[in-house]
Each structure stands twice: as C-alpha cells, then as structure tokens.
Image (tube, rainbow, N blue to C red):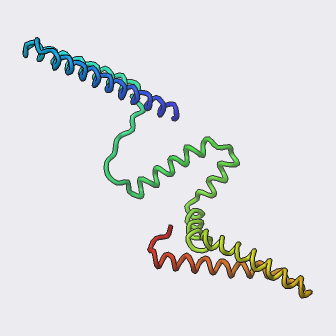
C-alpha cells in the first residue's frame, strides 16, 4: 500500500515538473515572439499554435502514462460529507487490515479493546470520571496532603492508618472535577 502511494506521489511530482517545464517553454516562446518585431502576425500565430499543440501533446502523454501506472489503484473521488455509516465501515476495514498484520496475541488484544462495548465504556469513563485535570489534581493533592500528614504524624508520634493517601486523592480528584465543570460552564468547550 505504501509503494502504491509512493508511485502515485512520484507520478504527481513528474506531472507537476512537466507542467512547470511546459509553462517555462511557453513563457520563453512568448518572450521571443514579443521581442521579434520583424515576424509577421501570421508567423507569430503559427508559432503560438505550434507551441499549443506541443504542450497539448505533452500533457496528453504525461496524463496517459499516469493513468496507465495508476490503473487498478484508483480510488473513486467522493464529494460531500461522510456519514456515520461510511465512517464506521471505513474504520472497520482499516482495523481489519491492520489486525491482519499483527501477531496472534496482539490481534486478539486489539479485537478486545476495539470492541464497541469496550470503546464506549472507555469513552464514557474518560469523559466523566478519569478526566486529566481530575487525575492530575488528585495525584498532586494526595502527594502534598500525605506529605504534610506524614510529617505531622511523625513529629507528634501518631501512627498512620493507610487511608490518608486514598482520602487525599479523592479530595484532589473532586477539586479537579469541580474545576473542569466550572471551566466548561464558563468557556463552553471541553478542551
């Protein structure tokens, strides 16, 4: 698939280079016809017609070579928006092609995690509970409060139960979620 794309890119680059060289030839011809006042209008028209024919022949030759190379590898051009059904079909086709290239264990893992139920659950959790700001603030507050609690407990001779870190994380997570939702209310976007 990559080699087809490379062939397509090289043929397009050749087409662009050929068009540039044709443009330069036409410019040179136009400059020579403008600079030669001695030529009759009939001669100027004949030269211009000859240049047009040469340009057309070259363009047709380049186009036919490109079509011959791309035969069988052309994708139909589509206009308009892509609906959900087409997007899902394309996704499944791409995932199928990629999974065929994976080793058996990775293929099975990929099929499990790209299952519709697992993906929807992951998206739901990622958009509600496991938001980045909530996780970050939970970890930050847990670190600071646990450090302070441990320092105070060590200084005063108290023993810790082990719930301090979990409780501090929950408090920090709640602060992070509150911050996210207030930000969404004010700005109106989730990013």
Identify the residue at the far right of this view: 157
Q: Position of residue 189 (x, y in %)?
A: 46, 71
As displayed, is residue 81 above or below residue 184?
above
Identity of the residue drawn at 39% across and 38% down: 75
Q: Is residue 51 above or below residue 167?
A: above
Q: Quick check: 6 left or right of 55?
A: right
Count the marks: how many? 0
Residue appearing at x 57%, y 80% in the figure: 178
| 146 left or right of 114 in image | right
Q: What x and y, as percent, mark residue 186? A: 46, 78
Q: In which quarter of the view is residue 144 placed? A: bottom right
Q: Residue 121: where, in percent of width, then height?
A: 58, 68
Q: Nearer the viewer, residue 138 or 1?
A: 138
* Residue nearer the viewer, 153 or 123: 153
Residue at figure coordinates x 59%, y 77% from the top left: 177
Q: Nearer the viewer, residue 64 or 11?
A: 11
Q: Position of residue 87 (x, y in %)?
A: 44, 54
Location of residue 40 (image quadrant): top left
Q: Is residue 21 left or right of residue 145?
A: left
In the image, 49: left or right of 62? Answer: left
């Amino acid at each position: 698939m990559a080699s087809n794309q490379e062939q397509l890119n090289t043929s397009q680059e050749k087409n662009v280079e050929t068009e540039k060289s044709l443009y330069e030839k036409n410019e040179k011809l136009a400059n020579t016809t403008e600079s030669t006042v001695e030529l009759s209008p009939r001669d100027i028209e004949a030269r211009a017609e000859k240049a047009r024919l040469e340009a057309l022949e070259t363009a047709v030759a380049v186009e036919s070579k490109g079509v011959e190379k791309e035969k069988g590898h052309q994708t139909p051009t589509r206009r308009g928006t892509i609906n959900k059904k087409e997007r899902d079909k394309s996704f499944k086709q791409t995932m199928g092609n990629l999974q065929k290239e994976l080793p058996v264990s990775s293929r099975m893992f990929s099929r499990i995690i790209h299952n519709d139920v697992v993906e929807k659950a992951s998206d739901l959790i990622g958009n509600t509970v496991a938001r980045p700001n909530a996780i970050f603030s939970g970890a930050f507050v847990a670190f600071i409060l646990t450090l302070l609690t441990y320092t105070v407990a060590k200084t005063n001779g108290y023993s810790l139960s082990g719930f301090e870190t979990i409780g501090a994380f929950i408090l920090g997570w709640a602060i992070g979620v509150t911050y996210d939702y207030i930000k969404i209310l004010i700005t109106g976007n989730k990013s």
